[in-house]
Image: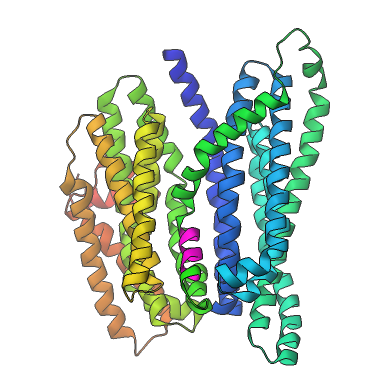
Amino acid sequence: MAEGNRRQTAKSKKNAPLAVSNSISMLLLLFALLGLTKQYGENVMGYMGIALSCYYLLILFFSESLSKTLTKLVKTRARREQYQNAKTVFHSAFFLSLIWGILIFALFFFGGNLISDKLLHAKLVVLPLRILGLAFIAETLMQCIGSYLAGIGMVKAVKHQLYLERLVIFGVSFILSAVFREYGEKVSALLRVEHYESAYTAMGVSIGVLCGAVTGLLYLAVLYGLVTRSNRQLFQNEHGRSRMQHENFITLLLRGQASSCFMQILKYGLFFLNIILYCAFQSEAEYGAIGSLFGKVLPLCMIFAMILLVSQGKFARKIVTPFRNDDIHTAREQLYGSFHYLVICGLPIAVYLCVMAENLTDFIFEKNTAFTVSALQCGSFLLVLIPMALLADTVLEQMGNKGIAFVIVFVTGVLQTIGFVVLLKQTKFGIMSIVYTQLFFWGIWMVLSFGILVRQIKGRMDVIHLFLIPMLCSAISGLIILFLSKALATILSNGIICGIMLLVAFVVYWLLILLFRGITKQDIKMLPWGVFLQHLGELLRVF
């Protein structure tokens, strides 16, 4: 039992750097979305948002699920020193990835007109969609090779590939979008149709995604060739060991993919599914509203959520390791400490975004709509709910409750989708239905998962310390910056107001947290600015 616990702990430690790298590299994409929206406007990002929603939804369904299954199978065989079997399972997965890639490319290329016109009601989306069909082949093959390399222990190589791919996407998207925009302007002027300019600009961004995927694929392919050559002796020493056939591994891969593909969509793809359903239920796609949601609200919320998600793997290890060693008291303390950290760090940022939504969006994007402000005000609280829900889900799974975690995600995901369709058809919320139902999904997922964890560690939750004090301090600091920003609106620019209010909110919030004793010395050690808070707390005689 102890040996099994050590293996699980080592496994989570190896996976943690990759999760951190994935979060950091995702920040590059989010900043790219912000930059492209600021430079080209909401219509371009509307086309891009619809095309990328189709692309990433299928990536989650076909590629991510297969990659996760491949990593598990390769790790198991590498641990048993069955390197030939590990290579065979990789070849089987590569074959499946190629098949899925070709099928989706054919769907996007030959069925693009039908999908964009009849399903999405956005005829010109076919231009970026066909480019993304090519990118899909490169992305699936790249993830396949990356999963194999991660499975045999080359996690650093996958980290470098993530950074390289996202940097290429970031750079090439800006360059080619400007080139294709000029061509789109000429086509729009010739045909006297305004939308061609935005569609061709989105096409340039799609080529940036394709270039990133191809670059990552070539990088990993070279590494795979070097690894195969250097480990040739290991493969030759396995003549006496049992080997499985390709057919057996393909069956295992398809079973694993079938069991995880829907979970991938329910966990990470409902936002993309909602955008596709929203377009399907409209007579004509609302590019401006979709562009605001995809290019403004999503990046601003997720940038802060990703910063909090970086610490998720570390927190999960600290909770699960003592639980496996039957140290329930330590596991309980780590659970409450981790969630308290996410609450006290995430809630003031959410309140700041909610209160300063109008000033912030006016400062970054110059032109805004009432929808953008309302969506950011509501969606800002997702940056607290998402890290908490994912942390609770990760801990539940690592504690051996995968069945319970699956039921929670499945039920909340189905309810979210049904609720979204009902709100869209029966109310006048329109695209705000996506924001409302996303809040519902992540909120219910977090509450149910956290509640089961609390029951499992047999502890009582200090609601006042954990939630109420941070909520009260956030509300007070939010009210202060609300009145101050209104008073300064006629004197200062939006950028200066946002900077001053950020500083005021930070000082007021943490001062109130200390005065209300909403933080302990143990909590302070987890904060980057903990040393300053500890000195301030001692000065105020809080500790």
How far across and how far down the image is residue 149, in percent?
A: 68, 33
How far across and how far down the image is residue 212, in percent?
A: 71, 56
Residue segment shown in magenta: 271-279
Q: Quadrant of the C terminus?
A: top left
Magenta region's main secondary structure? helix
Q: Is residue 187 magenta?
A: no
Asked whether, in this view, residue 471 is left or right of residue 259, the answer is: left
How far across and how far down the image is residue 422, in percent?
A: 34, 65
How far across and how far down the image is residue 502, in percent?
A: 36, 68
- Residue drawn at x 49%, y 31% is 12
Residue nearest the observer in this picture, 55 or 167: 55
Residue nearest the observer in this picture, 270 or 169: 270
- Residue drawn at x 53%, y 43% is 261
Query: Is 167 placed above or below 98 here?
Result: below
Query: Is 144 placed above or below 189 here?
Result: above
Q: Quadrant of the N terminus?
A: top left
Query: Is 93 placed above or below 3 here?
Result: below
- Residue drawn at x 24%, y 72% is 480
The answer to whether residue 135 shows anywhere in this view is no
Q: Is residue 277 magenta?
A: yes
Res 131 → quadrant: bottom right
Res 334 → quadrant: top left
Residue nearest the observer in this picture, 495 or 96: 96
